[in-house]
Image: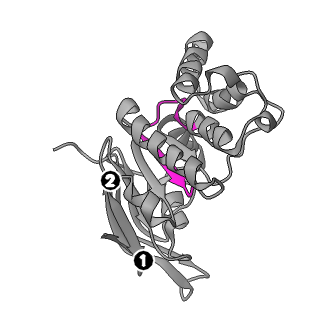
C-alpha cells in the first residue's frame, strides 16, 4: 500500500491560549496520492483551519503533520514556503487574481517562487495547455476584469496546478459562483484529479456539491468522520 502524501497525528488547534476554544481535538487523518474528497461541517467547525494546517499556512497547537513521511514539526517558515511552492496548490472562494496582469501572467505567478533555472518556454506551454483544457485558450491575453466569475475561478484553478503539486486544497471555491458555474467547477476539479494525478480536498457548505467529489468527510467536534 502506498504511503500517504499527508498524515495528521493527534492534531489539536486551540485559539485564545490554553483555556481557549479547541477547534481541532486530537484529529487523525491521512491523504493518499491521487485521492479526492470533500470536507463538510457546521459553520465555525474548523474546516478552513484544517485546510490551512494541511497547507502549512497554520500550525497545530499540539500533534504532528507529516508530508511525504517527513515530519514538519520544527520546520522553518522558509522550509514551509518552499514546500508550499513545490507541492501544494490553493484555490480560495475569491480568486485573488492580479488585476493588472493577463490570464497567462496570473497563471505563471507561482513559478516565480521556485528556485533554480527554469525553462520559461516549457512553463508557458504547460500554462497554455492547462488553460486550453479548462476552455480558456482564447483568453490568455485578457485581464481578469474581462472575464466572468466562473472564468476567473478557472484561471485560479490553473494557477494552483502550474507547479504540478501533489496536493490541491480548495476552500469553498464555489462560494461566489452561481449554481451552474459551481457545478462546472467541481466537475473540473474531478477531471483534473484524474488527469493530473493530484490529490484534491474541497471544503464546501453545499452537501450536494460535496457529494459530487465521490467521498465526503464531516468535521464534527474537532474530529473527522466519514459521512
Does residue 33 lie above or below 202 as drawn? above
Q: Please give the range of residues in magenta.
A: 160-173
Q: Residues within 10 Å of mark 1 (few under 14, many from 20)?
A: many
225 shown above or below 108: below
Near-viewer residue (31 or 12): 31
Residue lying at the far bottom in this picture: please name it: 19
Residue 10 visible in the shown view: no
Q: Are marks 1 and 2 in contact (CB under 8 Å)?
A: no
Q: Residue 46 at x, y = what percent? A: 51, 72
State left or right for residue 124 relative to residue 161.
right
As measured in the structure, the alpha-carbon distance from the residue carrying label 1 to the one carrying label 2 is: 23 Å
Q: Position of residue 195 (x, y in %)?
A: 38, 30
Tell me where residue 15 appears, x and y as whole percent: 58, 78
Tell me if mark 2 has few (under 14), some (14-19) or many (20+) residues whose alpha carbon lies within 10 angstroms of its own: few
1 or 2: mark nearer the eye: 2
Quarter-of-image position of residue 93: bottom right
**Which quarter of the figure has residue 128?**
top right
Q: Up-down: is 166 above or below 76?
A: above
Give the residue at mark 1: 222
Indicate which disc residue 40 carries: none
Local SS, label 1: loop
Q: Nearer the viewer, residue 27 or 169?
A: 169
Image spot of residue 123 (x, y percent)? 57, 18
Position of residue 107 in the picture relative to residue 132 (left or right):
right
Residue 158 belongs to magenta span: no
The count of marks equals 2
What residue is pinned by disc 2?
214
> SS of the residue at dot 2?
loop
Q: Name the residue: 79% across, 31% down.
A: 143
Residue at x-position 60% and y-position 10% = 121
Quadrant including the C terminus:
bottom left
Amino acid at each position: 500500500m502506498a504511503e500517504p502524501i499527508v498524515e495528521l497525528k493527534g492534531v489539536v488547534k486551540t485559539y485564545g491560549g490554553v483555556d481557549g476554544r479547541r477547534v481541532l481535538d486530537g484529529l487523525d487523518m491521512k491523504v493518499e496520492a491521487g485521492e479526492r474528497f470533500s470536507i463538510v461541517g457546521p459553520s465555525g467547525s474548523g474546516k478552513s483551519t484544517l485546510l490551512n494546517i494541511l497547507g502549512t499556512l497554520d500550525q497545530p497547537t499540539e500533534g504532528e503533520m507529516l508530508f511525504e513521511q517527513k515530519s514538519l514539526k520544527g520546520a522553518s517558515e522558509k522550509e514551509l514556503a518552499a514546500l508550499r511552492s513545490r507541492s501544494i496548490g490553493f484555490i480560495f472562494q475569491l480568486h485573488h487574481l492580479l488585476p493588472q496582469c493577463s490570464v497567462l501572467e496570473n497563471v505563471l505567478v507561482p513559478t516565480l517562487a521556485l528556485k533554480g533555472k527554469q525553462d520559461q518556454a516549457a512553463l508557458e506551454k504547460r500554462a497554455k495547455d492547462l488553460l486550453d483544457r479548462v476552455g480558456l485558450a482564447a483568453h490568455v491575453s485578457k485581464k481578469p476584469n474581462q472575464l466572468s466569475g466562473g472564468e476567473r475561478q478557472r484561471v485560479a484553478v490553473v494557477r494552483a496546478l502550474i507547479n504540478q503539486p501533489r496536493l490541491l486544497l480548495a476552500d469553498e471555491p464555489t462560494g461566489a459562483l452561481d449554481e451552474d458555474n459551481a457545478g462546472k467547477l467541481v466537475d473540473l476539479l474531478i477531471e483534473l484529479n484524474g488527469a493530473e494525478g493530484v490529490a484534491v480536498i474541497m471544503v464546501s457548505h453545499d452537501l450536494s456539491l460535496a457529494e459530487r467529489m465521490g467521498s465526503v468527510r464531516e468535521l464534527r467536534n474537532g474530529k473527522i468522520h466519514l459521512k
